[in-house]
Amino acid sequence: MVEVEMPISVRVRDILDPKVVEVNASASIKEVAKAMVENNVGTVVVTKDGLPVGEVTDRAILEKCLVKGLDPEKTVAEDIMEAPLVTIDPESRIGEAIRLMLEKRVRRVFVVEGGKIIGSITQTGVCSSILEIAGALQAL
């Protein structure tokens, strides 16, 4: 297991992106792609009976649908989604989020509070936050 120590205690809550786009498990890949474009996101959460069950990324659409020659109007989100979602508590430190991303080999972790997704953090977001903190420390 990878241990990640951060000199400053920054919580996941402090850097999360609250924008989460959801689609139903039965949504066609064409509908999923449309939701991604309309919301300017590369990942959507797949729900079934109102509960999050997985995620579909723009990369999954390419690799699991288009490259394989599947019809995006007949293939549904549930067919190509990644499951289960990798989640983290908003009070966790970003070092824990980094460790989780490395361990699970994911680029995004969903932040869950009270059983609901309240946002997500990405590798890029974590790196940007670390650079921002480093810059603030240098300015002191």
Image (cartoon, rainbow, N blue to C red):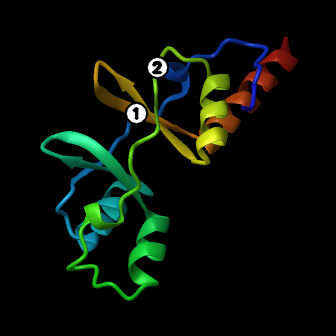
Q: Nearer the viewer, residue 25 or 37?
A: 25
Classify 88 as above or below 109.
Answer: above
Q: Position of residue 133 (x, y in %)?
A: 73, 22
Look at the numbered discs 1 and 2 and tell me whether their residues touch, using CB distance below 8 Å: yes
Secondary structure under badge 2?
loop
**Disc with the residue nearer the chain's start (1 vs 2):** 2
The amino acid marked with disc number 2 is Pro
Q: Nearer the viewer, residue 26 or 16?
A: 26
User: For residue 119, which numbered disc appears in the image?
Assistant: 1
- Quarter of the picture containing the N terminus is top right
Q: Position of residue 136 (x, y in %)?
A: 77, 19
Secondary structure under badge 1?
strand
Classify 73 as above or below 78.
Answer: below
Q: Is residue 41 visible?
A: no
User: For residue 77, which numbered disc appears in the image?
Assistant: none
Instruction: Tell me the residue that label 2 is attached to.
Output: 90
